[in-house]
């Protein structure tokens, strides 16, 4: 169900709670709060450089799999991982993911 901002604001002005508005409009009360306060939802960062390193969670999101799946593939050698920085977190090269497909 698509809800306009004006409708959400009108319902809030008549005294409904975020939860009540969410039930009526078919959205979460957190989304209602975001609409009323004008806070936009997080947008995925656009990666223009195919050779840029990705974090494990970015790679998982790109591949539409769980983070642990990416870690398991890295441990098995399916995906090539580079360890960067003092915490030695695994970063995956964009070219590795491109070759994976």
Image (tube, rainbow, N blue to C red):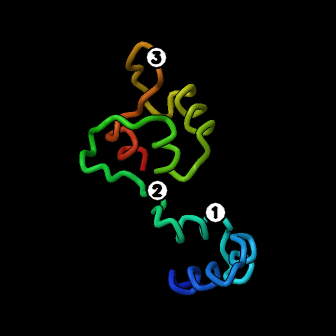
Pick whichever, 86 or 99, lies toward us: 86
Residue lying at 52% horizontally and 30% vertically, measured from the top left: 74
Above or below residue 91? Residue 86 is above
Task: Name which residue lies at 55% across and 37% down.
Answer: 70
Dot 2 falls on a residue whose secondary structure is loop
| Label 1: few (<14), some (14–19) or many (≥20) C-alpha neighbours in 10 Å | few
- Foreground tag (3 vs 2): 2
Q: Is residue 48 above or below residue 88?
A: below
Of 63 and 21, which appears nearest the observer? Answer: 21
Could you tell me how far apart the alpha carbons at marks 2 and 1 are, in whole angstroms? 13 Å
Q: Return the mark for residue 42.
A: 2
Of the image marks 2 and 1, the number of the one nearer the N terminus: 1
Give me the disc on residue 4: none
CA neighbours of label 2 inside 10 A, class few (<14), some (14 to 19), many (20+) = few
Question: Which labelled disc corresponds to residue 88?
Answer: 3
Instruction: Please name the residue that numbered disc 1 is placed on.
Output: 30
Picture residue at 24% right of the left edge, 45% below the top? 49
Image height check: is 13 above or below 61?
A: below
Q: Earlier in the sequence, mark 3 or mark 1?
A: 1
User: Residue 36 in the image: x percent, y percent?
Assistant: 54, 71
Q: Position of residue 19 (x, y in %)?
A: 74, 70
Image coords of residue 3 (percent x, y)? 57, 84
- Mark 3 vs mark 1, foreground winner is 1
Q: Disc 3 vs disc 2: Cβ atoms closer than 8 Å? A: no
Q: Nearer the viewer, mark 2 or mark 1?
A: 1
Q: Are marks 2 and 1 in contact (CB under 8 Å)?
A: no
Relative to 29, residue 52 above or below: above
Q: Where residue 22 sits in the image (x, y, percent)?
A: 69, 75
Judged left or right of residue 80, residue 77 is right
């Amino acid at each position: 169900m698509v809800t306009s901002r004006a409708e959400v604001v009108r319902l809030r002005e008549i005294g409904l709670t975020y939860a009540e508005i969410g039930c009526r409009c078919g959205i979460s009360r957190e989304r209602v709060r975001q609409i009323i306060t004008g806070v936009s939802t997080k947008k995925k960062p656009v990666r223009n450089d195919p050779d840029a390193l990705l974090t494990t969670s970015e790679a998982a999101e790109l591949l539409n799999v769980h983070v642990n799946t990416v870690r398991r593939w890295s441990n098995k050698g399916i995906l090539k991982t580079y360890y960067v920085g003092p915490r030695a977190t695994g970063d995956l090269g964009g070219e590795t993911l491109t070759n994976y497909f």
